[in-house]
C-alpha cells in the first residue's frame, strides 16, 4: 500500500490517524507500506501544547502527540509503528532539500488545499491552535473565506475583545477587531463580532497559546454566553469535544478556575520536553 497524504502539522488533523489505521490493517494482513513523505507546512522545529491523555483518544488523536508536533507524516508513522510494535514492512520515501526550519512558502511548492477549510499555508499555522475553537461556542471562521483566521460570536463586542487580547501577551500576531457573517456552520447568516488574527512573525507566533488566550478571554468577558460544544464530534458521541481536541480536561479546568493564559501555556512545558525526547530518534531531517 502506498500512502501519499499531506498533513498540516497539528494532532487533530485526521489524515495521519487514517494512515495509522491503514498501518494497523496492513500489519494484520501482512502487507507492506510505502509512505511518500510530505513537508510539514508549519515547520519541523516548534513543539507546542499539551500531550493527548489516554482517556481522550479518538479519531482526532490516537496517540499522545503534542498539539503542534513539528513532524512530517513519514516521521510520525515511523514513530507509531515502533510505539505500537506493528509487525510491518514500512518504507519512508524521504523528502529532498527540506529542512526543519522551513515554512511552506520556503519550499517553492504550490499549495493544494488538502481540505476545503485549509485554503492557504497560513491557515495551517493558525489551525494548529484555532482548531480548539471547534470545541466552543466561538466561531472559528468556517463559512467565511478566512477559516481559522477569524474568531467570534454574536455576543462578542469586537473592540473590547481585541483590546483585552492585546494585553494577553500574544507574540507574533496582531488582533484586529472584526465583524464577519458565516454562510454555514456556527452562526450561519448572523453577524459575529470578534477578531481576525494577523500573524506578523511566524517564528515568534504560538498558535496554541493564541487560541487558548482567545478562549480564556471570551469566557472571562462573557461568562453568561460562553459555552462548550456538546458531542457528538468526529465519531465520538460521549466525550466533550474540547477534551478530545485539547487532549484532556485541562482547558475546561483553566476556564473554570480563570487561569491566566500564560500560566496555562507554562503547564505544557514538561509534556513538550517529553515529546521532544520521544520524537528525536525518528526525525529524518535536520
Image (tube, rainbow, N blue to C red):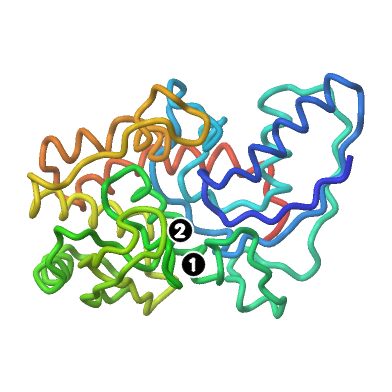
Q: Residue at x 52, y 50 (%)?
A: 10
Left or right of 87: which side holds 211? left
- Residue 172 visible within the image: no
Q: Residues within 10 Å of mark 1 (few under 14, many from 20)?
A: some
Answer with the quarter of the image where residue 240 lies.
top left
Residue 283 on image: x %, y %:
68, 49
Q: Residues within 10 Å of mark 2 (few under 14, many from 20)?
A: many
Left or right of 33: which side holds 103? left
Q: Residue at x 42, y 39 (%)?
A: 245
- Secondary structure category for the residue under label 2: helix
Towards the viewer: 93 or 152: 152
Against 52, is 35 above or below? below
How many tags in the picture? 2
Quadrant showing the C terminus: bottom right
Residue 250 on image: x %, y %:
28, 34
Q: Which residue is under mark 2?
A: 127
Q: Residue at x 44, y 35 (%)?
A: 233
Residue 202 on image: x %, y %:
44, 73
Callouts 1 and 2 close, C-beta under 8 Å: yes
Against 247, is 175 above or below? below
Against 41, is 202 above or below? below
Q: Which residue is under mark 1?
A: 123
Left or right of 66: which side holds 4? right
**Residue 267 has which mark?**
none
- Secondary structure category for the residue under label 1: helix
Quadrant showing the N terminus: top right
Against 100, is 229 above or below? above
Residue 192 on image: x %, y %:
24, 65
Answer with the quarter of the image where residue 163 lies.
bottom left
Left or right of 159: which side holds 178? right
Amino acid at each position: 500500500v502506498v500512502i501519499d497524504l499531506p498533513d498540516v502539522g497539528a494532532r487533530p488533523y485526521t489524515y495521519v490517524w487514517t494512515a495509522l489505521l491503514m498501518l494497523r490493517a496492513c500489519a494484520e494482513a501482512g502487507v507492506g507500506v510505502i509512505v511518500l513523505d510530505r513537508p510539514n507546512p508549519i515547520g519541523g522545529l516548534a513543539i507546542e501544547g499539551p500531550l493527548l491523555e489516554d482517556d481522550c483518544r479518538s479519531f482526532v488523536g490516537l496517540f499522545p502527540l503534542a498539539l503542534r508536533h513539528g513532524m512530517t507524516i513519514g516521521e510520525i508513522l515511523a514513530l507509531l509503528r515502533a510505539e505500537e510494535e506493528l509487525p510491518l514492512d514500512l518504507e519512508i520515501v524521504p523528502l529532498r532539500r527540506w529542512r526543519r526550519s522551513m515554512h511552506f512558502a520556503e519550499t517553492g511548492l504550490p499549495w493544494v488545499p488538502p481540505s476545503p477549510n485549509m485554503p492557504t499555508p497560513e491557515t495551517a499555522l493558525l489551525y494548529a491552535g484555532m482548531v480548539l475553537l471547534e470545541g466552543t461556542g466561538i466561531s472559528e471562521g468556517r463559512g467565511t473565506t478566512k477559516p481559522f483566521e477569524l474568531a467570534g460570536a454574536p455576543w462578542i463586542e469586537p473592540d473590547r475583545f481585541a483590546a483585552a487580547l492585546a494585553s494577553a501577551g500574544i507574540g507574533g500576531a496582531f488582533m484586529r477587531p472584526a465583524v464577519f457573517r458565516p454562510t454555514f456552520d456556527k452562526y450561519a447568516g448572523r453577524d459575529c463580532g470578534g477578531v481576525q488574527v494577523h500573524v506578523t512573525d511566524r517564528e515568534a507566533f504560538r498558535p496554541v497559546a493564541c487560541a487558548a488566550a482567545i478562549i480564556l478571554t471570551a469566557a472571562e468577558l462573557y461568562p453568561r454566553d460562553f459555552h462548550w460544544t456538546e458531542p457528538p464530534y468526529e465519531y465520538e458521541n460521549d466525550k466533550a469535544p474540547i477534551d478530545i481536541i485539547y487532549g484532556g480536561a485541562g482547558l475546561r479546568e483553566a476556564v473554570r478556575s480563570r487561569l491566566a493564559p500564560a500560566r496555562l501555556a507554562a503547564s505544557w512545558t514538561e509534556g513538550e520536553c517529553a515529546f521532544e525526547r520521544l520524537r528525536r530518534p525518528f526525525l529524518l531531517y535536520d
